[in-house]
Image (tube, rainbow, N blue to C red):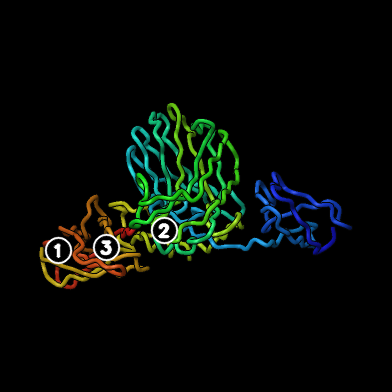
Amino acid sequence: YVRGEVISFVAGFTNTGPMTLNVSALGTIAVQLGGAALRGMEICAGLTYTVMLDTTSTCQIIGGLLPFTPNTLINGGFEVWQRGAGGSASIAVAASTTAYTADRWYITTAANQASVVSQQTGLTNGSRYCGRFQRNSGQTGTGAIVAGQPYTTDMLVPLRGSKITISGWLASGANWSPTSGNLTISFYTGTGTEGKRGGGFTSETTVVTTTVALTAGSSATFFSATSSAVLPTTATQGELQLTWTPVGTASTNDHFSIDDAKVEPNLGPSPFDRPLFVLEHVECMRFYQKSFKYATAPVQNVGSATDCAYGVAGKAGAASESFYMTLHVPLRDNSPTITYFNPVAANAQAIDITAGNLACSATATSITGSARFLIGTTGNASTAVGNALAVHFTAEMEL
């Protein structure tokens, strides 16, 4: 081969390690895709790729007939964790519970399956974090556990009428317990109201599904699957779902990790597109946002009123007060769930900062909208006109 020469791969070719080519005048060199050595990445059947050489005696496969397509998942790289404490998020999920963890990703546990979803070092080059789903040590529940990301209708529109490909990277803990290590990844659609899949969608279609057998303690493993038919043009519900069924009593490392998950309207997996953190953070805030600093998990008595929602008392004493909070990004709908947190005590009340952080009472939301909401509270007996009031909050508009 020579500089810029076009090479072809036959149908079914799969690279299982860094690939080499014998290039004229340079000898054997490594072939890279997107700047990273190929590892388990399927080369799409029958397509032609161009090899470009650089001065470091490496080359890149830089193009083929299969177009690059953007990711329709939000936070597919598990970089955004607003519900956790910044770069060390660890979110406990009780048994028999459904809860959101990493932004846009939820988990549903069954009986005796208390779990933790945590932020871990990324599985791929360019990834800062991945998501780890772990059954707690000593838990005995062996029902199916489900994790997933439900789609709004507007997220589904770019996929309608197209065959789709799901892909990503997986790894497992040393005590990963499902039979044969099986983890099933599926994309479902339906024609009903937006929401989680639960027991199934209205007029449900399984668009694509694949089962990956992860050996215990496996390193980063690439998976992909392409649908045989197009995603229905009538779809209004959708969800990427991961399902596994643990076996026996959990040991200390009964978990798997996922990174760079992608759902795209394509005939094969294209390289993962990694948005800037700030842009993905803003996209996630359409579904969930908080007053706390990003690196602070939402809790009562965080010890500081910094970044709270603030208002000014218009009356003296224990009188009715109200003030508006404008959100950073409009939520996807106008009926969010607002949860309040006292910044300096273990309750859900606003405080009067000027009066020495004394608690108000009866803090609640009286008017909500997609872009702002009205906080109503009863001032403290020591509240004077003009005193500063504050309260932390979370605003959630998830499916």
Q: Residue at x 14, y 61 (%)?
A: 380
Residue type for callout 3: Ser
Residue in the image at 12% along x and 71% along y: 315
Tell me where residue 65 appears, x and y as whole percent.
68, 62
Find residue 158 and report its horizontal and vertical position in percent. 49, 64
Secondary structure under the numbered disc 1 in the rendered image: loop
217, above or below 317, in the image = above
- Residue extending furthest top? 248
Residue type, label 1: Gly
Q: Earlier in the sequence, mark 2 or mark 3?
A: 2
Label for residue 379? 1
Q: Position of residue 70 (x, y in %)?
A: 54, 62
In the foreground, 65 or 380: 65
Is residue 66 in view? yes
Which quadrant of the structure image shows residue 174? top right
Query: Which residue, given by chain and number where applicable, does mark 3 sit on?
Result: 335
Q: Which labelled disc corresponds to residue 235?
A: 2
Q: Of callouts 2 and 1, which one flags the residue occurring earlier in the amino acid sequence?
A: 2
In three-dimensional space, the C-alpha distance between marks 2 and 1, rounded to whole angstroms, equals 49 Å
Q: Secondary structure at mark 3?
A: loop
| Disc 2 from disc 3: Cα separation | 24 Å
